[in-house]
Amino acid sequence: MATITIKNLVKKYGDNTVVSNLNLSVNDGEFITLLGPSGCGKTTTLRAIAGLVEIDDGEIYLDDRLINDLPPHKRSTSMVFQSYALFPHMSVRDNVAFGLRMQKVPKSERDDRVKEALQMMGLAELADRGPGQLSGGQQQRVAVARAIVTHPVVLLFDEPLSNLDLKLRERLRIDIRELQRRLKITAVYVTHDQAEALVISDRIAIMDKGEIIQCADPVTIYSHPANAFTADFIGQASIIKARVIESNEYGCTVETPIGKLVSSDRPKGASNSVMVCWRPEEITLYQEEHHNRIEGKIESNIFMGNLTDLFVDVNGTSLRVQMGGSVNLQPGNKIVLGLSKDKVRVIEAEV
Amino acid sequence: MTKKNHTLTLLLLLFPGVGYIALMLAAALVMTVLQSMGLFNFTGVSQFGFQEWVEVFNQQTWDAFAYSTKVAFASSLLCMILAYPLALFLRREFLAKKYFNAVIRMPLFMPALVAAFLILNVIAYHGIFNEFLIRLGIIREPLRLTHDDWGLGVIGIQIWKNLPFQTLIVTSVLASIQSDLENAAKNLGAGPWQVFRDILFPLSIPGIVTGVVLVFIGIFGDYAINTVAGPNYPPSLAIRMYTNANIFNDWGQAACIAIIIIISSMVYAWLITRVASFATR
C-alpha cells in the first residue's frame, strides 16, 4: 500500500528526450494506466518507478520517501513484463518462490505463500513444470503470481497482455483488475490498447511525446477528451476544424465545413480557431430534439455485424457515422442526420 | 520435371558444397585410418595389420598424452575463469571501451607461433620479466618459465592467446540472455551478486561450455606453442606425431597418434559437456 508521486521526470537517450517533465501522482490502492502510442515514454516511466532505468532529472517518491537513488532490488515494486521474463531454468514453483528467497523468508512460510499464490492464479497443477511447457496465458499468470507473492507495495505492469490473443486478453485483464482490487495494491499499468485501458483503470494518463496530456477517469477521457490527440486515440472520433462565431455561458456556435453547429461546450482558449469533435456513434438519424441537422449523401455502407459504418458526403466533407445493426441505404441515397449539442466537444486546435 | 529428376537436381546443386567437404574429410580420415593399419606406407612395405597400434601404446606416447591432457585442461579452465569476469566487466559502459576492446582482442589476430615468440621474449630465462625481478632483488636466480617440466610457459601463452576468444564467446552468451530476466530478478529483490549467481551464471553455462570445448581442443592438439615454449620432455601429442612422421619417417605411428588426438578430443569434449550438464542439474 503506497502512493507514488513523480515530479518533473526527465529521461534522455543521447539527444533523444523520451520523457520530458512528467508529473503524476497515484493514490493509495489506485489502478492507473499509462496509455499512448509506442515511443511515447510510457514504458520508460514505468521502468523509472521500478528503478530499471536511470533518470536524468526529477523526483520519484514512494509515499513520502524519495527513491531516486534506491537500487531496484530495494524498492518493493513488483513488475510484470511484456515478455513474461520467467526464469527458463527454474520450475514454476521456483520462479514464484524467487522473490521470497531473496527476501530470506523461511522455507515453510515460503512454501505456503507460493502455494497460495499459485492457487490464486489457478496454477496449482502446473507448479513443477518449466516455463517452456506453458502456454502464453499460463506464463503470464505465473508472472503475476511471482509479482504478488512478495506482497509488494506497488504493482507495475508493462504491456502484460499484448503478446496474447484477444479472448485471453479480455479474460486476463478482468482477472488482473479483480486481483488488484482484492489485494488493494497500488498499480501502474502500461498499454497501447485503449479498450484495455478503459476496462481496467481507475484513471487513465494519456501520453504523447514524453508527456501526460490528459489524466482522468475512463468516462471523462472518453466523453470529454481535452484535445484532438486524446479524442483520436481513445475510441473513434470525427474531428474537424471550426471557427467560433458566437460564444456565451451556455455554449457556442461554430462554422465548419459541414455547416453551422451548436455546442453546449465552450472554447477554453481565446482563439477563434478551434476544433470540434464527436464520436461516430453519436450521430443518428435526425429527430426534433437534435440541435444540429446535417444533410448528406451516402458514400459507402459497410456492414460490420453489430454495427454499420456509413460514410456520408456533406458539402464535400466525408463524415463517418456508426449505427447499430444494418442500415438499408445505398450509396447515392440522401440521408438527414442529427447531432445533439452536448455531444459536440470543442477542443484546442492543433498548433 | 519428375520427382526423381528433381531429387537428382537437388543433389547436384548440393554437391559443390557438401560434396567437397564430404570427399576431402572422408578421404583424409580414411587415408589416416588405413595408414595406421599399415597400408599406404610411404617409406616401407605396405602390409595390413595392427602392428602400428601395438607399437604406439608405449610409455612415451602415454607421457605425451598425459602432458597434453594436463596442459589443455589447465589452460582452458583458467582461461574461462579469467574470461568470465572480463566479459561481465565489458557489459558496462565506460570511457574508451572501444579502444579497450580493440586491445584485448589483439591476440585474436596473431598466429599461435607469433604469439609464442612475443611472450617468450618476456618470460624467457633471461627475458624482461626475470631480469626485472632480479634487478628489484625479489629473486636471485631467474625463474624457469619456459621449457619447464610442468608446461607452465605453455599454459601462460595459451591463456594469453585464447583469452580474447573465450571472452568473446562469454560476452555473446551473456548478451543473448534476455535483459528482462535480469530486470525481473532485480525487481524481485536480487542484488548484483544474486543476479549473477541465480540467473546469469546458470543460463550462461551451455554457451560457455561450448567455448571451453573449442579452446580445449585447440590446446590439446597444439604444436606451435609447444615447440617454442614446451618442456624438452614430454612432447605434446602433436609434436610427437610430427616427429614420428618427419624425423623417424614412421608415418604409420604418426597416423596412430593422429587418430588418438581426434578420438581423445571427441571424448574429452563429450566429457566436459556431460560434467557441466550434470553440475547444473
Image (cartoon, helix red, strand yellow):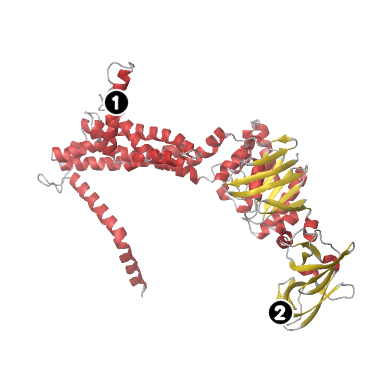
Amino acid of disc 2: Glu
- Find numbered disc 1 in the image and state the secondary structure of the residue it sits on: helix
Give the residue drawn at x 68%, y 41%.
Answer: A58
Q: Chain of mark 2?
A: A
Q: Position of residue B65 (x, y in %)?
A: 27, 34
Give the residue drawn at x 24%, y 36%.
Answer: B237
Q: Position of residue A20 (x, y in %)?
A: 66, 48
Q: Nearer the viewer, residue B184 or B273?
A: B184
The span from disc 2 to disc 1 (Cα, nearest Å) is: 90 Å
Q: On the image, which quarter does residue B238 sit in?
A: top left
Asked if labels 2 and 1 share a chain, the reply is: no
| B281 left or right, relative to A237 | left
In the rendered structure, find residue B253 and report the number of the disc placed on it.
none
Q: On the image, which quarter does residue A53 sit in?
A: top right
Mark 2–mark 1 CB contact (< 8 Å): no
Q: Residues within 10 Å of mark 2 (few under 14, many from 20)?
A: some
Q: Chain of mark 1?
A: B
Q: How many marks?
A: 2
- Outermost residue toward the bottom in this view: A332
**Residue tagged 1:** B128
| A276 left or right, relative to A45 | right
Residue B142's place in the image compared with A271, above or below, is above
**Residue tagged 2:** A299
| B84 left or right, relative to B12 | right
Q: Nearer the viewer, residue B212 or A97?
A: B212
- Find numbered disc 2 in the image and state the secondary structure of the residue it sits on: strand
Q: Position of residue B146 (x, y in %)?
A: 27, 27
Q: Quadrant of the N terminus of chain B?
A: bottom left
Q: Nearer the viewer, residue A240 or B205?
A: A240
Q: Residues within 10 Å of mark 1 (few under 14, many from 20)?
A: some
| B132 left or right, relative to A272 | left
Amino acid of disc 1: Ile
